[in-house]
Image (tube, rainbow, N blue to C red):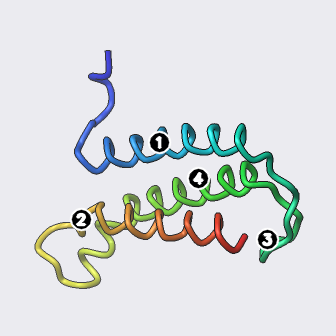
Amino acid sequence: MFEWMAWTTPVAVFFTCIVLMLIGMTVWEIRSPTTLRKGFLPMATTRGDRLFIGLLLAAYINLVFVGAAEWMAELMSLEEEPSVWISFVLSMLALALVMRKG
């Protein structure tokens, strides 16, 4: 069923984190309904809004990293492309920042 996708360990961990965040946010929303809040984003947002924006940001960070990996390897004279674990950590940090301060 999932043969079409390259299920490497980083990809599986990334999607597992997304599923766990969605489950956690659903439970949190049921137990404690959210209110609008203004952070560094240019609009008032709820927890769900910040999660959506953070997930988009995380996806773009990973896509840019994968797209630029060959270029980074050449630029830094590496024998192989940098690990996608780097983009995973960066994207989760960006997501946490948006959720906390956004």
42 shown above or below 55:
below
Residue at (29% x, 66% y) in the render: 70
Residue at (29% x, 62% y) in the render: 85
**Crowding at mark 3 (Cα within 10 Å: few <14, some 14-19, many 20+):** few
Task: Indicate the secondary structure of the residue bearing disc 2.
Answer: loop
**Percent position of residue 32, x then y:** 74, 47
Task: Indicate the secondary structure of the residue bearing disc 3.
Answer: loop
Specify whether 26 is left or right of 24. right
Task: Indicate the secondary structure of the residue bearing disc 4.
Answer: helix
Name which residue type carries label 4: Leu
26 shown above or below 56:
above
Check the picture and name the quadrant holding the C terminus. Answer: bottom right
74 shown above or below 34:
below
Circle 3 residue = 41
Check the picture and name the quadrant holding the N terminus. Answer: top left
Q: Nearer the viewer, mark 3 or mark 1?
A: 1
**Crowding at mark 2 (Cα within 10 Å: few <14, some 14-19, many 20+):** few
Specify whether 42 is left or right of 32. right
Instruction: Tell which circle, 3 or 2, labels the residue nearer the N-terminal end.
Output: 3
Name which residue type carries label 1: Leu
- CA–CA distance in space, label 2 to label 4: 20 Å
Q: Which of the two residues, 100 or 86, is positioned nearer the viewer here?
A: 100
**Percent position of residue 7, x then y:** 27, 36
Instruction: Tell which circle, 3 or 1, labels the residue nearer the N-terminal end.
Output: 1
